[in-house]
Image (tube, helix red, strand yellow):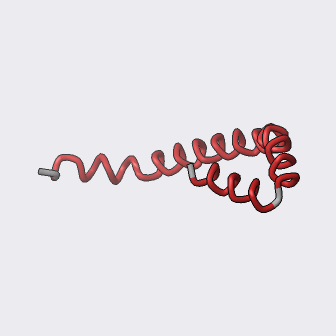
Amino acid sequence: MFTFLLWCILFVLCWPLAILALIAYPFIWLLLLPFRIVGIAVHGALEVMYLAITLPFRLLAAPFRI
């Protein structure tokens, strides 16, 4: 919603730039999509490494939890 309000303000102040942004947004989104996919994959791999390293400590602490 905030992005839409910013676009409306831009449309009032400089409508050609707002129309250009509206047309360019899908292309920029497609350009950045591989980086998002790589980021999700790297985050998942780091999460698996973190869980593998902390598993023994969590297993040792589990019986003592209330």
Left or right: 38 in relation to 48: right
Picture layout, residue 33 above or below residue 65: above
Question: How far across and how far down the image is residue 63, in percent?
Answer: 17, 47
Q: On the image, which quarter does residue 44 sit in? A: top right
Residue at the far front in the pictured view: 12
The residue at the point 47 percent across, 45 percent down is 52
Q: On the image, which quarter does residue 38 sit in? A: top right
Residue at the far bottom in the pictured view: 13
Picture layout, residue 9 above or below residue 33: below
Question: How far across and how far down the image is residue 54, in percent?
Answer: 41, 52
Question: How far across and how far down the image is residue 7, in percent?
Answer: 70, 53
Residue 34 vs residue 59, the one in the foreground: 34
Left or right: 31 in relation to 51: right
The tally of labels here is 0
Question: How far across and how far down the image is residue 42, in percent?
Answer: 65, 46
Left or right: 9 in relation to 34: left
Residue 63 vs residue 19, the one in the foreground: 19
Picture layout, residue 23 above or below residue 8: above
The residue at the point 47 percent across, 51 percent down is 53
The residue at the point 65 percent across, 40 percent down is 41
Residue 56 vs residue 6, the one in the foreground: 6
Residue 54 vs residue 37, the one in the foreground: 37
